[in-house]
Amino acid sequence: MPNETPIFSAKNVVRTFGSGKKLVTAVDDVSFDIADGEIVSIVGGSGCGKSVLAKIMLGLYEPSKGSFQYEGHKITNQKDHWDEVQFIFQDPFSCFNQFFTIRSQLEAAFKIKKEKLTPQQISDRVDAGLMAVNVAPKDIEGKYPFELSGGQMQRMLLARIFALRPKVLIADEPTSMVDACVRANILDYLMKLKEELQMTIIFVTHDIGLAYYVSDRLFIMHEGKIVDQGKPDDVILKPTSPVTVQLLEDIPEIHKEWIKR
Ligand SMILES: Nc1ncnc2c1ncn2[C@@H]1O[C@H](COP(=O)(O)OP(=O)(O)OP(=O)(O)O)[C@@H](O)[C@H]1O
Ligand SMILES: [Mg+2]
């Protein structure tokens, strides 16, 4: 029997910051269900609430109103949650400590896992994670984060995900610091995570062209609300919101070829 409980279920979720004149409504009455194994992209301009929504999914923020559930229950313990839900943020250097080798940090990431593995099993999983992103383990042996480029470090974040094998990955603008070639690689790895490990992936981006390329479903956000959603072909070929039309006009030329009109 397939698991029918949604991975994430949001009902009228609102998240505000501050109060009075300084009140900011970052997420404004959003409702959705995300199924196990889906790749959903959250697309929208700067400040529309994408990262706040991603942080609600990670259990870093609670909704101010409404209900948000992971696999049918409220997120009460972040540590338990991160055993299953992992993330990649925009800046890979902020996710690694400059004073420890990359390998030691990839291995230390297993501390959050409830599944208890031996040091040898952890080492093997790290090797497998590195090889999944086409890095030979000996190439990072003894290396520190500052010895690698931004693109190589993005790859280390992905190696960490391949090694840890969470159920859900939340990737917030993972391609914004890298050139077009590395960006295409990252997108290919996201699809490999879905295909080989059946991961559910939430991909946050400004770029509707990238989102089209990888997603099963798109959420278009504007001023905290989901203003358009559906399968990529439907959203892009029959946009129902002027926000979607504007995002389509803003697609970098290089990605337009990905959209089969
Ligand atoms: N901790 C916070 N305290 C106060 N306001 C916040 C906080 N986090 C986010 N906001 C505000 O909430 C709104 C949505 O922010 P969010 O970071 O989700 O935008 P975004 O869509 O991710 O933008 P970008 O594409 O630039 O990353 C913004 O107005 C932002 O200033
Ligand atoms: Mg953001």
Image: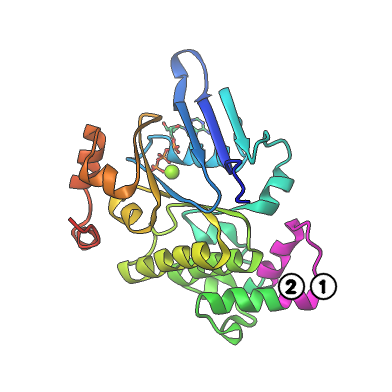
Q: For the view shown, which residue lies furthest in the top direction?
A: 20
Which residue is located at x 40 percent, y 29 percent? 224
Distance between the Cα atoms at labels 2 and 1? 6 Å
Give the crowd class for mark 1: few <14, some 14-19, many >=20 residues within 10 Å. Answer: few
Counting from the top left corner in percent of width and height, residue 198 is at: 55, 60
Q: Does the magenta stretch include residue 197?
A: no
Q: Which of 112 and 165 is in front in this view?
A: 165
Task: Report the side of 127 relative to 30 (left or right).
Answer: right
Q: Find numbered disc 2 in the image and state the secondary structure of the residue it sits on.
A: helix
Quadrant observed for ligand 1 in the rendered image: top left
Residue denoted by label 2: 122
Which residue is located at x 39 percent, y 53 percent? 215
Q: For the view shown, which residue lies furthest in the front direction?
A: 1
Residue denoted by label 1: 118
Indicate whether 187 appears above or below 14. Answer: below
Query: What is the magenta segment's predominant secondary structure?
Result: helix
Which residue is located at x 80 percent, y 68 percent? 117
Indicate whether 224 appears above or below 218. Answer: above
| Residue 14 is at least partly visible in this image | no
Q: Quadrant of residue 157?
A: bottom right
Q: Does the residue labelled 2 lie within 8 Å of ligand 2?
A: no
Amino acid found under the numbered disc labelled 1? Thr
Counting from the top left corner in percent of width and height, residue 234 is at: 27, 44
Counting from the top left corner in percent of width and height, residue 57 is at: 57, 41
Q: Nearer the viewer, residue 89 or 72?
A: 72
Which residue is located at x 78 percent, y 61 percent? 115
Identify the magenta region. 104-123
